[in-house]
Amino acid sequence: MDIKGLDYNTQREKLLMPEYGREIQKMVEHACSLPDKAERLKCAKTIVRLMENKNPQVQDSTNAEQTLWDHLYLMSRKQLDIDWPFDVSAAEKILSKPQPMEHPSGGARMRHYGRLIEQLFEKLKTMPAGEERDELVRLTANQMKRNLATWGHGSMDDEKVADDLARFTDGKIQLDLQTFRFDRSAGVVSDNVKRNGKKKK
């Protein structure tokens, strides 16, 4: 909403370094507009002293004065033409964003199953038929059903588990639901999980 006579921050240009406030930003813009280079430098030194008062925690950092001049350089959008008392060529690194962290799931395709279950899928693909594989299938299927129940997916029926098990093992494991029996605990969500999952009224 634009009301004549009222000046809202939401209508103004976004500050590059909001910790110094809009008044300091205006001073920087004024310094950039001065025609005389010596006058611009004199004005810049005054602004840096004001920035130090405005943001005293900078003093706790190493190379505090360098940091202040770096900040001034960024606030001027690299337009302030002066003989800089410090090298400000690396100032832009201050605004660079950190690299995104890898998700704790380790890049699992389906987070409701998790990375461990995916590793079991891969193992089952290469295991020869026999008692050892049958036991691993039993453990994997039951854990899949528990995970579905915990994540509250709603479709934690036996067919869902059998279908996913076949799909993610490239058809190597076909669960015969006529003979296979899930553990009683599989698919049962504990009371604590149920309580935590309820929305407060």
Image (spheres, rainbow, N blue to C red):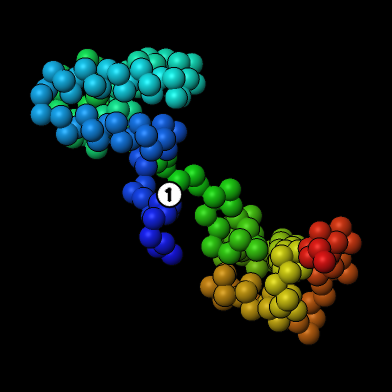
Give residue 179's quadrant in the image. bottom right
Residue under pointer 1:
9
- Return the residue found at the far front: 5
The quadrant of the picture occupied by the C terminus is bottom right
Kind of residue sitting beneath label 1: Asn
Looking at the picture, how far across and down is residue 86, in whole percent? 24, 17
Q: Quadrant of residue 118?
A: bottom right
Residue at the location (55% across, 58% down)? 108
Q: Secondary structure at mark 1?
A: helix
- Determine if residue 182 is in view: yes
Quadrant in the rendering for residue 193: bottom right
Residue 54, position in %: x, y? 44, 24
Left or right relative to 164: residue 44:
left
Q: Residue at x 64, y 79 (%)?
A: 163
Instruction: Out of 71 and 20, give the one closest to the viewer.
Output: 20
Q: Residue 153 placed where, x, y %?
A: 70, 72
Q: Is residue 146 visible?
A: no
